[in-house]
Amino acid sequence: MNTVRKRRRCKMVLSDHAQAVFAATKTRSNDGIDKMRHAAKAIMANESAIIVGVNGSYARREATSGSDVDLFFLYTGEHKEEAVEYQRRVRERLKDDGFEMPAPGGVFSEPLSVSMTREMIGGQDDSNVQITRRMLLLLEGEWIFNESGFNQARTQLLRKYVPDNLRDDKICLFLLNDVIRYWRTICVDFEYKVQNDDKPRAIRLIKLRFSRMLLFLAGVLAIGATHGQNVDEKVETLSQYLALSAIERIQEIAGEKTYPALELYAEFLTALDDTRIREALSQKSPAGEESQEFKRLRKLAHDFRDALVELLQSHYDDDNPTVAALML
């Protein structure tokens, strides 16, 4: 009997440790988001043409002592210049307030037209950057300014994935395929970035195998939950589940079946919050991969993957096509 099965038989509630870890990261994240919202509101007042959101650990309610702030700015119409200026001012304000800002670059380094988030889904012009923008907005984005505009942008994007003629007995296969493509893209891009950008491999690999894998699984579960619903119900279900963090989303959908995986995820977040461990993982190759901290987390990552696989296999009955769609 493997380790995951043993855990599932003897533990049907989250441990006090895991609950405390998730409560602490959620509190830290919510406090940070409240400060971001206050800062953006003070600068942007009643501006209606600009949307500000955040991705990353704050949006996932997983902020630790080493987290930075991954903001994104969207604009409607011809308001790019205003968005650029607001972006500069809000980021400067948050930096002054003590937030860690990410290195220059990234898929949201410049403001983006809202319409661009839902254009070119598929085809030769649909780049890795475009895929990443869509998926981050859908799977982990959280509003900072202009909540109604943010929700509308997400709903309009979802509508692109859920055609009016989609049958009740079908899942949103168009969206599922794009979520799968995103997951496979970041897995392939991981190797490129660590080989060509001289990035620390150990910490990136551990984050890939925990936070990105969980985000993927949480997206799959949300899509699977649309089985048996009409089109409007599918969009509403997706909207409601995608508004939750990945941790809360999988618990809401799959309940106690998620506990074995979440116990391991709590260990991952605990490690990220430890400065000594982060420093060990952030060493360049081969030092990072040779550290005892990496070797321990790599073993936990293997168990985490096994727990997620078992969760998928046990959650769906034979009538739900989600697992089959993941394979073929």
Image (cartoon, rainbow, N blue to C red):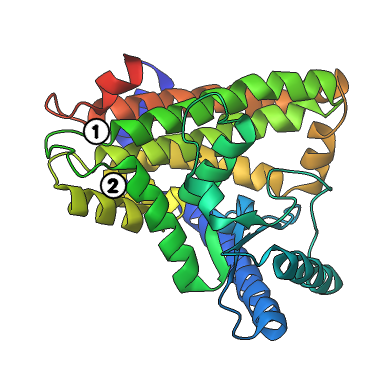
**In the displayed structure, does residue 204 sit left or right of residue 7?**
right
Reading the image, the residue beneath label 1 is: 315
- Gap in angstroms between the C-alphas marked 1 and 2: 9 Å
Residue found 75% across the figure and 66% down from its top: 81
Residue closer to the observer: 218 or 8: 218
Residue found 32% across the figure and 50% down from its top: 238
Reading the image, the residue beneath label 2 is: 253
> Residue farthest to the front?
78
x, y percentage for residue 197?
84, 26
**In the displayed structure, does residue 119 sit left or right of residue 235?**
right
Kind of residue at disc 1: His
Kind of residue at disc 2: Ile
Q: Measured along the vertical axis of the image, is residue 228 above or below residue 70? A: above
Q: Is residue 239 in view?
A: yes
x, y percentage for residue 86?
74, 71
- CB atoms at circles 1 and 2 under 8 Å apart? yes
Q: Measured along the vertical axis of the image, is residue 319 above or below residue 139? A: above
Residue closer to the observer: 125 or 168: 125
